[in-house]
Amino acid sequence: MRLRADLDRCRGAGQCVFTAPDLFDQDDAAGLVVVLDPAPGPDRQPLAARAADACPNRALTLSPD
């Protein structure tokens, strides 16, 4: 699975970081999402999906490798 962030859609709500702090962070300049693990393992994929669902701006996408 590949995890991607669309920085044009991100508004820095931080729900991804709140949901999965080991997969996401926010940059210091604008508070936009930073993907820490773009290829989470099978054990982390459900959490990545929850974080993507929690994003109010739908800035996160998950896709097969």
Image: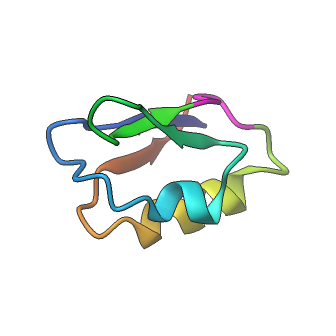
Q: Is residue 23 above or below residue 56?
A: above
- Residue 8: name its quadrant: top left
Q: Position of residue 38 (x, y in %)?
A: 58, 28
Please tell me whether residue 43 is drawn above or below residue 47 in the rendered image. above
Q: Residue at x 23, y 62 (%)?
A: 57
Residue 35 is left or right of residue 14, and the answer is: right
Give the residue furthest to the left.
8
Residue 21: image x %, image y %?
Answer: 67, 50
- Describe the colour scheme in one phrase: rainbow
Q: Residue at x 61, y 30 (%)?
A: 36
What predominant SS class does the magenta segment belong to? loop
Residue lying furthest right: 43
If the image is split into quadrants, where does the C terminus sit? top right
Left or right relative to 30: residue 21:
right
Q: Nearer the viewer, residue 3 or 13?
A: 13
Provide the residue span drawn in magenta.
36-40
Tell me the residue at 64%/29% (across/down). Answer: 39
Q: Quadrant of residue 19?
A: bottom right
Magenta stretch holds residue 53: no
Left or right of 23 on screen, residue 13: left
Residue 15, horizontal then vertical, whole percent: 47, 65
In this rendered view, identify the residue nearer to me: 62 or 30: 30
The residue sitting at 46% across, 33% down in the picture is 34
Q: Quadrant of the N terminus?
A: top right
Where residue 55 appears, x then y in whole percent? Answer: 37, 65
